[in-house]
Image: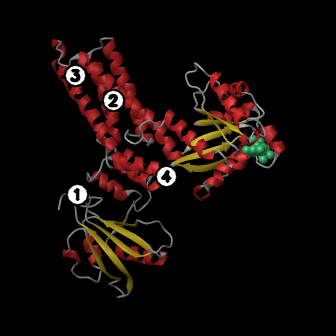
Amino acid sequence: MVQTIFSDTIVALSTPPGAGALAVVRLSGPAAIAITASVFSKKSMPDAAGHTLHYGTLRDPSSGEILDEVVAALYRSPRSFTREDVVEISCHGSDYVVRQVLGLLLRQGARLAEAGEFTKRAFLNGAMDLAQAEAVADLIASDSALSHRVALNQLRGGFSQELRELRARLIKFAALLELELDFGEEDVEFADRTGLAQLLSEVRGVVAGLLHSFELGNVIKNGITVVIAGRPNAGKSTLLNALLREERAIVSAIPGTTRDFIEDEVSIDGLRFRFVDTAGLRDNPADEVEAIGVSRTRQRVRQAALLLYLFDLTEMTPAEVIAEIQELTRGLALPVLAVGNKTDLATPNAQGAFLAQFQAAQVGLASPTPMVLVAAGQKRGLDELQTALLTEVRGSALENTASATIVTNVRHARALETAAAHLQAVQAGLDTGQGTELLAADLRHALAALGEITGEISSEDLLTSIFTQFCIGK
Ligand code: GDP
Ligand code: ZN
């Protein structure tokens, strides 16, 4: 058995509370197997190998009462989630049974686990680093295919690996700088300044990329806010309803935080889109007219990740559409999708001409607004619209999602920001021929910030704040 740090054995319900077919009660610690064996019918358990399943009954030794038929999964240190001896008892999933089983195990010497304590032990016993431990929380919370993939990648150590490589390269230079310091007045330069500048610019590039990915990580975790704007009667409510009905099974309605707008979520290709209809209450035209005031809409647009500008194809010219989009997005760097509605009222020729004029009017622009045509009332063109939404989002933020590391955690982003600031100071110091002492100090700070992410550098406060965000049993 390898040496682990904790002498006590913790226990908790690891499945969600409430009635279910099965519930899993998990123990971890040096006495996990002995405690289970003391109430388990099968006497051979203490000698059993790790990674084995044991069917039997749990009996309260004081009353002799049989509590439940269970299957106990046994893991021996260090080959377990926490690296300690672990037993997972699958019992019947009623609250009553679970309470009885937990009570019994507590009486036999286990202690009730605190929130996140299993994962915390896994970290402190060296089974995973901090970023991986946090990914466990993300994985449990992930509710789209993509957020699941990102968390899993982090859990497997993709992000940590990248950070370790960064730190290792910086540490080499930091060590050389420290060596110079040791020689003091003699004015030696061990660290090659050109090499350091080169390395710095590389590392800063990587950190900036990771920080940029945080935006995307947020998008994946929290969904993409799409604001639907357009003149009254463009068909905003009709379009929103059509999008929602298409995805009925995976749609949830969120009441708006104010009565002026409505939010709904649709999952498209594993990404969550949160649509905000700026027109206000759906069935009240009076409200709607009042609510589309440009300033009010602009407020919503400012919070959007993407603007969907909807217009009635038969009511507006391409120039008017472009002008209104410019008006709505003035001063904002925001991807926009123009959606022409009511194709059922326009001939194919008229539609073609509109598209051509719209494109012609934007020739020479750095980022021309793409357009799709739909008939929301007839639910036509919705597939093309969804594809265009995905393309817009991917094009602006989701570059290389499959392979690149994505930062999803606020703590990690803050640490990266700190590291970036100190690295910039090192850069400035190099540019101005600053003394070794200041360079070394800034480099040390940057290294500390990067180290905080994986927990190579950690404090008790930090650990507590991270692991208490978990629920009990994780
Ligand atoms: P909003 O004010 O932008 O929310 O527009 P609504 O969704 O309330 O729609 C305004 C009117 O346009 C309603 O009478 C809709 O039935 C109609 N409408 C919406 N989409 C279409 C469409 O694709 N074709 C036609 N012909 N009418 C539509
Ligand atoms: Zn409406």
User: Is the CB of mark 4 within 8 Å of ligand 1?
Assistant: no
Going from N to C along the chain, the mark reached first, 1 or 4, is 1
Looking at the picture, which amino acid does disc 1 mark?
A: Thr
Task: Say which residue appears at 32% left-offset and 27% top-offset.
Answer: 203
Of labels 2 and 4, the one closer to you: 4
Res. 39 visible in picture: no
Q: Quadrant of residue 115?
A: bottom left
Going from N to C along the chain, the mark reached first, 2 or 4, is 4
Pointer 3 local density, CA inside 10 Å: few below 14, some 14–19, many at least 20: many
Instruction: State the image coordinates of residue 460 (x, y, percent, origin top left).
Output: 35, 46
Q: Quadrant of residue 164?
A: top left
Res. 362 visible in picture: yes
How far apart are the alpha carbons under marks 4 and 3?
Answer: 46 Å
Task: Say which residue appears at 53% left-offset and 46% top-offset.
Answer: 222
Looking at the picture, which amino acid does disc 2 mark?
A: Ala
Q: Note whether 277 is above or below 193 in the view shown.
A: below
How far apart are the alpha carbons under marks 1 and 2?
Answer: 31 Å
Instruction: State the image coordinates of residue 450 (x, y, percent, origin top left).
Output: 33, 35
Lateral position of residue 266 relative to residue 312, left or right: left
How far apart are the alpha carbons under marks 2 and 3?
Answer: 14 Å
Where residue 4 is drawn, which disc sits there? 1
Pointer 4 local density, CA inside 10 Å: few below 14, some 14–19, many at least 20: some
- In the rendered image, which residue does mark 4 sit on? 144
Going from N to C along the chain, the mark reached first, 2 or 3, is 3
- In the rendered image, which residue does mark 2 sit on? 446
User: Is the CB of mark 3 within 8 Å of ligand 1?
Assistant: no
Q: Please say if the residues under marks 2 and 3 sit with CB atoms less than 8 Å apart.
A: no
Task: Residue lying at the far right in this picture: please name it.
Answer: 286
For label 1, the SS is loop
Instruction: State the image coordinates of residue 56 (x, y, percent, origin top left).
Output: 31, 82
- In the rendered image, which residue does mark 3 sit on? 177
Pointer 1 local density, CA inside 10 Å: few below 14, some 14–19, many at least 20: some
